[in-house]
Image (tube, rainbow, N blue to C red):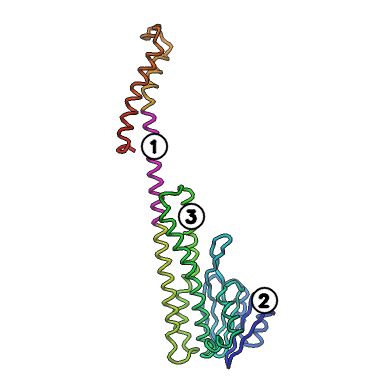
Amino acid sequence: MRINKITFGTLTWVDIISPTHEETKYLSNEFNFHPLALEDCLSEIQRSKVDEYDDYMFLVLHFPRYHKNDQRLSSEEVDIFLGKDYLITLHEGELKPLVSFFKACSEQEEVRKRFMNNGSGILLYEIIRRLFNYCFPMLDKIATNLGQLERNIFKSRSRMMLEEISRLKLEIIGFRRILKPLRPVMKTLEMAINRFLPEKLEVYFDDITDQIEKIWDLLENFKEVVDAFLGTLEANTSYRINNLMRIFTVISVIILPMTLIQGYFSMNVEGIPLAQHLFAFWFTIVVTLIPAAIIAGVMFYKRNEWL
């Protein structure tokens, strides 16, 4: 069983990575948790939630995780049992802040004394705070990419820019999808956690609520910006298409006199003027090119007004 345990004073922190039926059976025997809560630890729950029981709470929380290899966000689930003198976390070991914090608590007495001396509620607060802080480097990365898009939106090719904007938009949508269910859960937790907190420390979870609202406001701003970029790119693409149509129209107008005169002299009928003349061919060339040259010159002179 991959069960790690830290005990400091009366508080015990149990951390389980990649839980199986064996680990949930251990929790059932040791803590007598509800079978439905233990079943949720083995199944992938799509939305975050808080379930309250007589002497403990069960939380399912989701946090974003960035994959550098394929540049995408995924949702990582953390299941938490919170009691008066214990905290149990179950996860897949992919969230670095949680893994590193448990390691620091297990190896450094000063860290244990600082974060495990005031009960399970404060320890839970520190875990959630670190997991939310883990979101800000990802948000900074999105903000940097948006800044690059803003500088290059009129320089890069439309297809490449569209792919970059679409990728960023999917990133923001994925972030919002993970965070949106967490907002009401954190408000519920803020009201329900008081029985596991020492007196005068209830304000700690109000800080968590402010933090998640700050992240949500940033995502709302990013969403508006990327939507504006898409609108700008569409307008820019439409402008380029209109310019191409104007150019094709100009070419058609230049060719029109040539087509008209050549069509006239190519008719297979008797009596066409100059048909038998020695210089008929050169005459038609001159008559064809002069109007075309005049029209082309006028359009070139007026190109800033027409194109």
Judge by depth and name the residue closer to the eye, 147 or 169: 147
Q: Which comes before the other along the chain, label 3 or label 2?
A: 2
Residue 212 on image: x %, y %: 44, 74
Instruction: Indicate which label's residue lies in the foreground, 1 or 3.
Output: 3
- Give the extent of the magenta segment: 228-253
Nearest the eye: 17 or 56 = 17
The reply to whether callout 2 and callout 1 are in contact (CB within 8 Å) is no
Label 1 amino acid?
A: Met
Q: Is residue 35 magenta?
A: no
Q: Secondary structure at mark 1?
A: helix
Mark on residue 164?
3
Toward the viewer: 113 or 179?
Answer: 113
The N terminus: image quadrant: bottom right
Amino acid type at mark 3 = Glu
User: For residue 190, what is the image quadrant?
Assistant: bottom left
Q: Give how far across and how far down residue 80 sits, in percent.
A: 56, 80
| N-term-proximal mark, 1 vs 3 | 3
Q: Is residue 199 above or below residue 300?
A: below
Residue type, mark 2 in image: Thr
The answer, for residue 72, to whether it is visible in the render is yes
Q: Nearer the viewer, mark 2 or mark 1?
A: 1
| Residue drawn at point x = 40 percent, y = 18 percent | 262
Residue occupied by mark 2: 20
Say which residue label 1 marks. 245
| 271 left or right of 109 in image | left
